[in-house]
Image (tube, coloured by chain):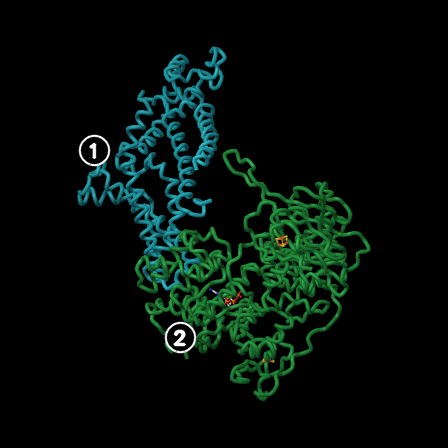
Chain colours: A green, B cyan
Amino acid sequence: MKGLKVRDLQVEIRSGERRLVPVDGVGFEVAANECVALLGESGCGKSLTALALMRLLPEGADIAQGTAELDGIDMLALPEREMRRVRGGRLAMIFQEPMTSLNPVLTIGQQIEEALTAHGDASQPGIKHQARELMTAVGLPPERLAAYPFQLSGGQRQRALIAMMLAGDPEVLIADEPTTALDVTVQAQILALLKQLQQQRGMGLLLITHDLDVARDMADRVAVMYAGQIVEWASRETLYQSPFHPYTQRLFQVLPAISRRGQRLAQIPGNVPGPEVRLEGCRFSGRCLRVMDRCRQETPAWRQLSPDHGVRCHLADGVDPMAAPVAAPAPSETSASPSAGEGAAKATGPVLALQGLAVHFPVRTGLLRRTTDVVKAVDGVDLEVHQGETVALVGESGCGKTTLARAALRLLEPTSGRLELLGRDIRQLEGEALRRQRAAMQIVFQDPFSSLNPRMRVGEILEEGMRALRPELSGQQRAAGLARLLEQVGLPQDVVGRYPHEFSGGQRQRIAIARALAVGPALMVLDEPTSALDVSVQAQILNLLADLQRQQGLAYLFITHNLSVVGYLAHRVAVMYRGRLVETGPAAELLTRPGHPYTRLLLGSVPGRGLPETPASVPGGQAAAPGGGCAFAPRCPQMRRECLEEQPALRELAPGRQAACLFPLV
Amino acid sequence: MSAYLLRRLAYALPILLGVNLLTFALFFMVNTPDDMARLHLGVKRVTPEAIENWKAARGYDKPLFLNVQASGSGVLTDTIFFEKSLAMFAFEFGQADDGRDIGNEIRTRMWPSLAIALPTFVIGLLVNISVALILVFFRHSYVEWTGVVLAVAMMSISGLFYIIAGQYLFAKVWALAPISGYQDGFNAARFVWLPVLVGVVGGLGAGARWYRTLFLEEAGKDYVRTARAKGLSEARVLFRHILKNGMVPILTGAVAVFPLLFMGSLILESFFGIPGLGSYTIDAINAQDFAIVRAMVFLGAVLYILGLILTDLSYTLVDPRVRLK
Ligand SMILES: Nc1ncnc2c1ncn2[C@@H]1O[C@H](COP(=O)(O)OP(=O)(O)OP(=O)(O)O)[C@@H](O)[C@H]1O
Ligand code: SF4
Ligand code: SF4
Ligand SMILES: [Mg+2]
């Protein structure tokens, strides 16, 4: 067979006496002109598998056994000298972090040319020519060969990296989470580019991803990985229509989506186990809803259900391979979540009201550090958030979402505009008065690993806020409050004496939420609260947030780039582009019938609905500001001459819906 | 670029003024001219007149900051601070206790200092980088292990040991070089090579170990993995990627100490009898010649700040992220 065939791959990490096996008997194949997705949550061993195939494992990690044949030659047995010719030649790999994967002091051209020299003996002019061709192939203008990596955007860097890895004309290209660090719009372009290159060149593509929707768009076959093993292997159609393994089935159910609005998300209890946790028997048995006695004792063997469908689960025993797959368990308990009540209670005034809020950062240059320019990070935003309501703020990275949130909480001084919390103007408040208002507004950050002080016990972290912002409480009241808080966020009472590093990402995010709740806020700003978490853990946190809102009538300002989460959770959506809101409206309507071309572009980029037509490079999110017209004009497919003349203001499209576009789509 | 340079120089001025004031306070206010005179003339049997004469001969009889008896600008200029301290900005260092002009002395003595310090520095840099690269290239092997152990041993040994061992072996036992001394012109080489060798070997342990750490840090970065994934040979990865990035902190660090080479090396020069600025300073400290010590402290500060400015400039030259901003 042409292509890549991996058998029984095992990677071990030795540290002292301990031997971890993060990749344990992995096997799959990638045929020529085929895209295979290796799908799994973080820490399951995807990257180590890929690095093992490239023989680029980090120090301490080694290949313990297995074969990886490329056209019948086992690459794992090749001497290093010959492997070097394979690497970047017949087998190439692109990495997750475009920001750090390129050498900062060499130009893109130098870095592409050295890959070309390593895998051919073309003359100098030939190499220059080839480099230009590669740039065109990945949708970059050849002039950019002279650029240094820091002069390119994230998407452009990823294209440059792809160009380098195409230099050796690989038979199989491994792409390890190639778009995870990118905006949805850029992600869609890069994925389309990879698919196009794969088909044009008849190349095998091994796409490593944690995203079910990305895999659905890209893959011909999918391998699902859990705790170092492949647990299911099937063609895309089979896997997405009739997944067999309880883990795969559950993965589909935990995904938030607009179709699940008002329903409670199914959860997978617990966390993804790392390589240091290895259960007897089936590795999923601790979290499996269909676990049987024998699962805990006996390791399930690999079973072929049909020629293109295999699983590792005891349930496959005694299944007639040709019979219909086992029905998935009932999707989810449909207890009402707050999104059931569209446009929740608005009886009282808004909890948070912004009027013309602006944050401008001065740009200083010259000898005297004079202000020569301003960056309008937030430029005149009107927004209201009501009790019991979730308003989602969406937009590409750098559009000003986080600045807006920080200014709304007065963690940052707004340049102008009005800022009201519970009907009180808090822009003028100072000192003690401001501190007291702070109790009413709390923030939860994206990164649960850095937002908690590592040197404080959980109990101290939770009490700290209460002490500062609710000084009237007695020690006893605080202790009682603490116990109630932990119960609310679903943590056991004994966590108070432990330190943050002892907890998993999901648990830390629960702690961060508890810390915010501790002072009894009316408004919580949630800045990408689940984007650092695994999907199975994300569902737990989203359910928790929904419960808390229902019980306490909290108002949420939810900042995210994940439109599926928005569709699932938000009542209203505000779309932000370069410091301004370009569309606002009820989530259900806005997400199904967008009014602004930018909203439509965002929605069209969400993976899982097929790839966009044109993978060509589109100006990035921060293209230069046009004269005075619509800021979105350079990227807008609907653009007309009028758009360049005036900056469109937000106008009513329908009751409760507004868009800042001269030619709205609805 | 020139605007940037001007700004850096403008920032340096207040710092130098501060240094100037501080040395002045140390040398004239903590330790008054009267104290100095008594120190020099001996504590017993000094008459007040003798002290006054001593001070007058050196211009130390004037007021510290304000001369109320003088007229016009003399109120400010006819003072110790102006004549002895501020004058150093014009590289007027006055006279040493033996009556010689310190400025002249510095100008003649800096050449022998440079003759030792410059080769030590350049050769040392090259040797340290090469040894560090070898250690990184052979990482996880006995070569690296042995090298690191040796480096730690070498940096734990006192610098004096290298000097004495060098003099004993090369000068006394093998008679390949004079034990100490110096001559100008072409003859200098005969006297210079041994101190340079000793200087390079003495700095090797610490230098190689430090550069190795820098290179290893680079070697762990993502772009190195990308370079390997292209199929580049280990040597190419090392020289083209790791070395090039590792050189950014090394070069800028080297540039920082470069101006200080003029000051020479205190210990090497005294042991090898090199008539440079290092031995000049040591001798002045021994003889308690405050005028010289003060001049050298100030000169050191100027050169140090110059080094910092050069560091910033060199960043803009080596690092495209800074250069093209
Ligand atoms: N150098 C190393 N030393 C020790 N443990 C390691 C090392 N590299 C990886 N691991 C562990 O091995 C496991 C698998 O790692 P791997 O990077 O392959 O996961 P992954 O599936 O790619 O995850 P992600 O989605 O987060 O990239 C993880 O638990 C990780 O902590
Ligand atoms: S083997 Fe048992 S525990 Fe494991 S996935 Fe199958 S049913 Fe669940
Ligand atoms: S105003 Fe014009 S350019 Fe701007 S979004 Fe609307 S159609 Fe596009
Ligand atoms: Mg990974």
Extreme-left residue of the structure: B175
Mark 2 or 1: the one toward you: 2
- What is the chain letter for disc 1? B
Which one is in front, B100 or B138?
B138
Quadrant position of residue A258 = bottom right
Residue A70 is marked as 2
Residue B299 position, x and y percent, is: 38, 30
Residue A291 position, x and y percent, is: 63, 80
Disc 2/disc 1 C-alpha distance (Å): 68 Å
Which one is in front, B51 or A429?
A429
> Is residue B185 visible to the viewer in this orientation of the structure?
yes
The answer to whether A401 is drawn above or below residue B52 in the figure is: below
Residue A69 position, x and y percent, is: 40, 76
Mark 2 CB in 8 Å range of ligand 1? no
Whether residue B272 sits left or right of residue A542 in the image: it is left
Give the residue displayed 22% in from the left and 32% down from the top: B184
Whether residue A210 sits left or right of residue B253 in the image: it is right
Amino acid type, callout 1: Gly
Tell me the element at label 2: strand
Check the picture and name the quadrant holding the N terminus of chain A: bottom left
Tell me the element at label 1: helix
Which one is in front, B39 or A383?
A383
Pointer 1: what residue?
Answer: B185
- What is the chain letter for disc 2? A
Residue A445 position, x and y percent, is: 63, 55
